[in-house]
Image (cartoon, rainbow, N blue to C red):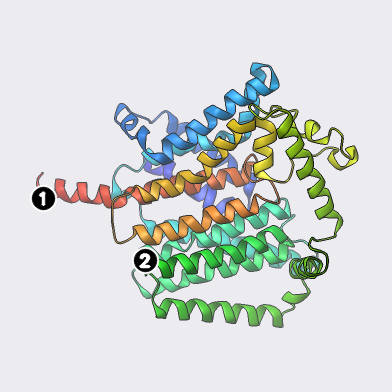
Amino acid sequence: MRHFLFLLAIIAALVMAPVSPEAGNILFLIAGGLALFSLRKADFVTFGRPIVWMPLLGLGLLGLAFSAGAGTIRGLEGLLPFAPILAIWPLIMLPRDTRQVDPEYIAMFSFIGTAGALAIALNEYLTTGVARAGASVANPIHFADVALLAGFLSLVGLIYVQSVWRYLFLSGPVLAALAATLSGTRGAVVALVLMAMIAVVLAGALRIINLRIFIAAGVVTAIALLIGFAAGLGQTTGVQRVMLDIADVLQTGLPTDASTAIRLSMYKGGVNAFMTSPIFGHGPFGFVDAAAAGMDAPLFVGAPHLHNDILDFAASAGILGLIAYGLFMLAPLVEVLRAPPSATRSGLLVVVSTLVVGHFVMGLTNAMFGILTVTVYFAAVCVIVGVLAELPRCSAKADTLAAHP
């Protein structure tokens, strides 16, 4: 049953979230909820792991700030969108036997989810001519965010798959890039460039990328770009919007479109809201109105957030919220850095660093935390990092037990 719950959670997030987010979210939360009842006394020893205590401490700080900022215990209701984070610890504890965790399946699930996202984007673009693909399953922005995270997560296949099939996973980021471009999401396109740069630079610095892999990645990327532009990729909304933004930046220093103007107004309001209540913020239900005070009110009508993770945390939960945000973002990195030395740790560090940077960059232009599908995916990434980071240690224990039963 424990193995089944773990697989259910991973498949729900990695395979289903990119293509059927509602169903994936429900199944992930069900698996996480049931996993809570499987916790045993021995599992509490692992509470000191960064991937466990950092997210939980972040939730605790958010709960304190939300209650104080809202002026009532009902402020805790603002934690509901962060519920997937509660599933990280129990889900990590499920696969105690290392033989129950096959990293190759994790890579393949991620790749399937990425390919599924691209299939949806292509189907919408080719059959309906829609300017922003992905709307049939989610908001195009969130669709692109999850697709991009899935594509780069599939790179774990390069670390753990030993056969020639490992090079298949080099195409994961390429497929994700095409899906993100067809969605017309500028933030994801910018994140894509930075994620690719981080991956290459870190892999080179840690000396884990060889010439063969570098050439293979370049060839896959070049072929994909040639095919894409031959098929009209340059005429998609995503590429055109980015090119217009680049032209605006070169001419005026900032993009001049209406969407950017609204976001800049929100950001200014968010900073003002933080300054008026810097410790606890304005609570999860009043921070948007606080940001709108003194600004052009119509820009904020019906807005659930400020299109920026940092300002959302700052305006809603003040300094405590910013600390919580830092704990969430750094937990996967700290977990890998404190993992035992192994042949796979450097590669895992590259993939995790790339995902964290991507999550951060995409969160600069739209909310990531608090959006259920993206939060579920972040929680799933933390679960995977927690499991993979412990594989060398658990394998060593298993070998010891086998040698000395």
Amino acid, disc 2: Val
Q: Position of residue 134 (x, y in %)?
A: 71, 58
Do we see residue 8 in this rendering? Answer: no
Which residue does the numbered mark 1 point to in the structure image? Answer: 403
Q: Secondary structure at mark 2?
A: loop
Of residues 237 and 299, which is closer to you in this image? 299
Q: Residue furthest top?
A: 72
Which residue does the numbered mark 2 point to in the structure image? Answer: 161
Point 79% across, 60% down: residue:
254
Point 58% across, 52% down: residue:
359
Please give left or right for residue 220 compared with residue 309 in the image.
left
Of residues 20 and 71, which is closer to you in this image? 71
Point 43% across, 67% down: residue:
203
Q: Earlier in the sequence, mark 2 or mark 1?
A: 2
Point 29% across, 45% down: residue:
97
Task: Tell me the quadrant of the picture where the N terminus can be found.
Answer: top left
Please give left or right for residue 99 compared with residue 124 in the image.
left
| Quadrant position of residue 40 | top left
Of residues 204 and 11, which is closer to you in this image? 204
Q: Residues within 10 Å of mark 1 (few under 14, many from 20)?
A: few
Q: Are marks 2 and 1 in contact (CB under 8 Å)?
A: no
Q: Secondary structure at mark 1?
A: helix
Of residues 338 and 269, which is closer to you in this image? 269
Q: Position of residue 20 (x, y in %)?
A: 63, 51
Please give left or right for residue 218 compared with residue 127 in the image.
left
Amino acid, disc 1: Ala
Q: Position of residue 45 (x, y in %)?
A: 31, 31
Q: Label 2 vs label 1: CA separation?
A: 26 Å
Task: Tell me the quadrant of the picture where the C terminus can be found.
Answer: top left
Classify 18 as above or below 272. below
Classify 8 as above or below 168. above
